[in-house]
Amino acid sequence: MTIPDFSYEFDRILLDRQAKEVAERTKRVLGRYYPSEIPACLRQTFYSYYNPKPKPAKTLRVFEAGDMAHEWVKKMLTALVEAKQIHGEIASLENERPFTIVVDQDEDISIEGRFDDFLMLSNDRERYLIDAKSQKSLYYTNEFKKEHAIQIMPYIYIKRPCKGLIAYVDRATYETKFLPQAPTEGIDYDKEIMNWIFTRTKLLHKYIVTHTMPPPEAKQVKDMNWMCNPAICPWRAECDAAEATKDKWIKPQ
């Protein structure tokens, strides 16, 4: 038999899968937003609605590594529970129903998601919602990222009372850091952050339904500059060319 170019074939599988997802994205209902979109650059999310683009295979492989990191964390935590080294049980949330958080009933705006990417570690007294994130290196990772805390907050809101933990996994070595430091700490439900999420979701909705170009937040806010990386944002060229529409921006809240 002829041995195929496995690297090419692997990438083709990822690209074909993504093509179906991009096609489905064009069918999205206005007013329905994902938790991961809330802390993202407003302009980037705007483009994802009106000019959906595929990501390169290199980026898709990183996402696959993230899925593998999730499975690694689940496997290790389950082994600890089975060995009775920690008290509690690991519940995969893969079979949970999708959830909806109503943001504005009159405007028909809501946040929607699934618990597919989360684990729940629980006992009779404590519950931890765990989100695994893969990274190139953990050398400088000593605190959880602000955008990750925002992203997990709607899930904590739904599953409260519980605390959130971010499990950062080195993609090369599988070294893992749980932040905030477990088990005595965790990300608590924060009403102020949740109110900010509601306000920002309504702002995002206003941009999208009025076809108004948002400001390039990732260029303007230092902590968001990394989102401008071409490997993350496929709309860099369009964004650079859109500066002439500044007079149409709506000031973010």
Image (cartoon, grey):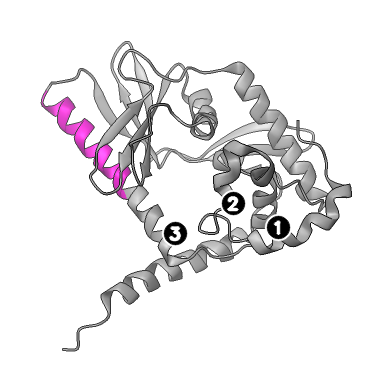
The residue to which callout 1 is attached is 239
CA neighbours of label 2 inside 10 A, class few (<14), some (14 to 19), many (20+): some
On screen, residue 65 above or below 4: above
The residue to which callout 3 is attached is 59
On screen, residue 128 above or below 216: above
**Secondary structure under the numbered disc 3 in the rendered image:** helix
Specify the segment rendered in magenta: 68-83
Question: x and y percent of residue 89 in the render?
Answer: 24, 25
- Which amino acid type is shown beneath numbered disc 1? Cys
On screen, residue 128 above or below 210: above
Disc 2 vs disc 1: Cβ atoms closer than 8 Å? Answer: yes
Question: x and y percent of residue 170 in the render?
Answer: 30, 42
Determine which quarter of the picture holds residue 199.
Answer: top right
Disc nearer the start of the sequence (2/1) = 2
- Which amino acid type is shown beneath numbered disc 2? Cys
Depth check, mark 1 against mark 3: the one in front is 1
